[in-house]
Image (tube, grey):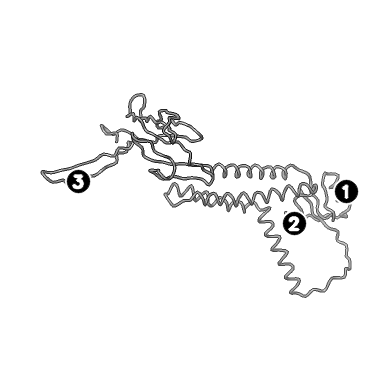
Amino acid sequence: MFAVFSDKVPAVVPAPSYSFQEVTQRMNEKSTFSGVTKLLFISPYFLLVFLVIPVYIVLGLKLRLPVSGDLLLANNVVFCVCIILRLVWRVLKMSRGDIRYGADSRPPKSELELDRPASQLQTELAGAGFIFAAGGRYGEKRDIGYLGATLLYGGLLLLLFFGSYDYMREYSVMGRLGVGEPMPLNPTGLIGPYEAGFFARYDKMPLVQVRKQILPNPQWPKGATEIALLSEDRKELAKTTIAPGKSFSYGGLDYSMTRFIFDALIVISGGNSIAYEGFVKFYPLPVKKGEYSY
């Protein structure tokens, strides 16, 4: 809550001599600085700009548009810098005293004219809890709203910082593995697309070996896979059975199975000639259709 008022006392003050162009330039510079300051440090609508890229990322994944994790990270970094500036701005305002919003931050939308002198109004408002600026023109009442908004900026800063840090340490890869030799998870030996953050360390990741594939049965309705994690010198570090909905965690990574995919060689011949020969991928159906489950 705030109050802005003035005494209507005529006075004659010698004014400095400025040309019309100089006065106009000074007013424009002040107006521009005030507008930029409000946009960066005060306006809540400015923060909505940082929602554009996350919304695009979500829609891009749904609509299969080209998306980039680096673009989202850059957006978070700029957003984090903006929040830091606002947080420092508000903390400095709090440390200087009880006047935090200021007369220029929230000008009143309406005015109420009273037939009492300003000094009397100041006394009455001070008794009601208002604190006045040095000039006496602007008064502000103590409340916890400013502190609450400052704490909100602090929490948002922590969320952005640790979320971005966790994202930069993230490493994900999806591949197709069958029973056979161990496969490395680093980019030199991958068999599928991968995504690595700036701080991701994949040079010491274990090798993954599929030792057994379990077809769907009453115990494993969607099938399962027995895997082993090996060191570079082929020593076994861990082994487990994973299945859709049942993952395994080791060394900060989650190993999971999505589904079975069968590569079948189809050969169609007529007489002594081959009409078709090639590999065809069979994917599991969400619901079995008659005798067919792939």
Q: Is residue 288 left or right of residue 149?
A: left
At label 3, the amino acid type is Tyr
Q: Position of residue 154 (x, y in %)?
A: 67, 43
For marks 3 and 1 on the same chain, the one whose residue lies earlier in the sequence: 1
Q: Position of residue 202 (x, y in %)?
A: 48, 41
In the picture, residue 107 is in which quadrant? bottom right
Q: Mark 2 = which residue?
A: 104
Q: Is residue 198 left or right of residue 266?
A: right
Q: Residue furthest left?
A: 271
Instruction: Determine the CA span between mark 3 and mark 1.
Output: 97 Å
Q: Which mark is residue 53?
A: none
* Residue at x 68%, y 60% (from the top left corner): 35
Q: Which mark is residue 123?
A: 1
Establish if 187 lies above or below 107.
Answer: above
Q: Mark 3 = which residue?
A: 276
Establish if 57 lies above or below 250.
Answer: below
For marks 2 and 1 on the same chain, the one whose residue lies earlier in the sequence: 2
* Numbered disc 2: secondary structure: loop
Instruction: Determine the CA span between mark 2 and mark 3.
Output: 79 Å
At label 1, the amino acid type is Thr
Front residue (pair 154, 210): 210
Mark 1 residue crowding within 10 angstroms, few (<14) / some (14–19) / many (20+)? few
Q: Position of residue 235 (x, y in %)?
A: 43, 31
Q: Nearer the viewer, mark 2 or mark 3?
A: 3
* Numbered disc 3: secondary structure: strand
Q: Is residue 92 left or right of residue 254?
A: right
